[in-house]
Image (cartoon, grey):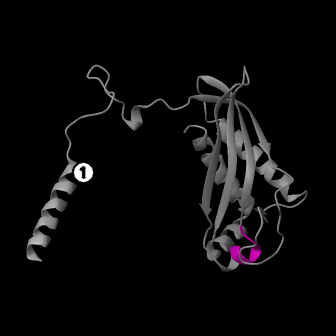
């Protein structure tokens, strides 16, 4: 038994040593053209000419004031219009504001099709701490030719909600749920368009 343990331990040492050895070999790399690091790889350089936001009417909506309703759209941060229209306008504003930050070489049209926007009900927002689960499909097209440059790509954003005490303080200052979500989306959508 002791011999078996010794053999096993020795084999394990050689196996682990083989996994971590660094002999510098990189498949298909030449000395004249070393592989770039992730930070050196070219990222898309866009100037967004137009943003198209699609919120399909087929997405289900819940107005239930439960902890986590089962639906594609759960949103309470806006009044007037349908939830689909409210989210389309919210995304359109945030994407346009975020796109203003981008001054790249390629003029593009960004098309975002919402597939899920699961925000918080009043019950969850004021009693618990949750998150906003936001999913969409991104397609980036060349604004001059219409050719697809990127996508379709599934994007998932998760925004942690503030603590209920902070929500009350935000409400008291006039900083609404819509403002909170829009401020997040402006930066997040700009970042999505640069990666």
Residue 73 is one of the magenta-drawn residues? no
Point 72% across, 24% down: residue:
143
- Tell me the quarter of the picture where residue 45 sits: top right
Residue 8 visible (yes or no): yes
- Above or below, 20 against 168 in this view is above
Give residue 34's position: percent from left, percent from top. Answer: 31, 26
| Front position in the image: 187 or 175 | 187
Q: Is residue 55 above or below residue 38?
A: below
Measured as percent of width and height from the top left, residue 127 is found at 68, 80
Q: Is residue 121 magenta?
A: yes
- Residue drawn at x 29%, y 33% is 26
Q: Tell me: 55 left or right of 7.
A: right
Q: Which residues are magenta?
A: 120-125
* Residue 108 as seen in the image, left or right of residue 88: left
Residue 150, x across and y down, in percent:
62, 33
Residue 105 lies, with reference to residue 55, above or below; the image says above
Image point 84% across, 70% down: which residue? 63
Q: Position of residue 181 (x, y in %)?
A: 69, 57
């Amino acid at each position: 038994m002791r011999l078996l343990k010794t053999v096993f331990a020795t084999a394990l040492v050689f196996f682990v040593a083989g996994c971590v050895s660094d002999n510098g070999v990189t498949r298909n790399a030449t000395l004249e053209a070393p592989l770039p690091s992730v930070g050196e790889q070219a990222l898309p350089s866009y100037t967004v000419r137009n943003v198209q936001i699609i919120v399909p009417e087929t997405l289900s909506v819940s107005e239930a004031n439960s902890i986590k309703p089962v639906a594609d759209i759960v949103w309470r941060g806006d009044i007037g219009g349908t939830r689909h229209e409210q989210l389309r306008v919210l995304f359109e504003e945030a994407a346009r504001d975020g796109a203003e930050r981008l001054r790249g070489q390629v003029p593009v049209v960004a098309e975002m099709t919402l597939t899920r926007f699961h925000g918080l009900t009043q019950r969850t927002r004021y009693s618990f701490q949750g998150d906003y689960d936001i999913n969409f499909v991104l397609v980036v097209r060349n604004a001059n030719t219409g050719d697809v440059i990127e996508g379709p790509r599934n994007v998932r954003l998760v925004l942690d909600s503030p603590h209920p005490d902070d929500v009350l303080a935000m409400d008291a200052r006039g900083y609404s749920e819509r403002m909170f979500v829009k401020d997040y989306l402006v930066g997040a959508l700009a970042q999505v368009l640069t990666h």
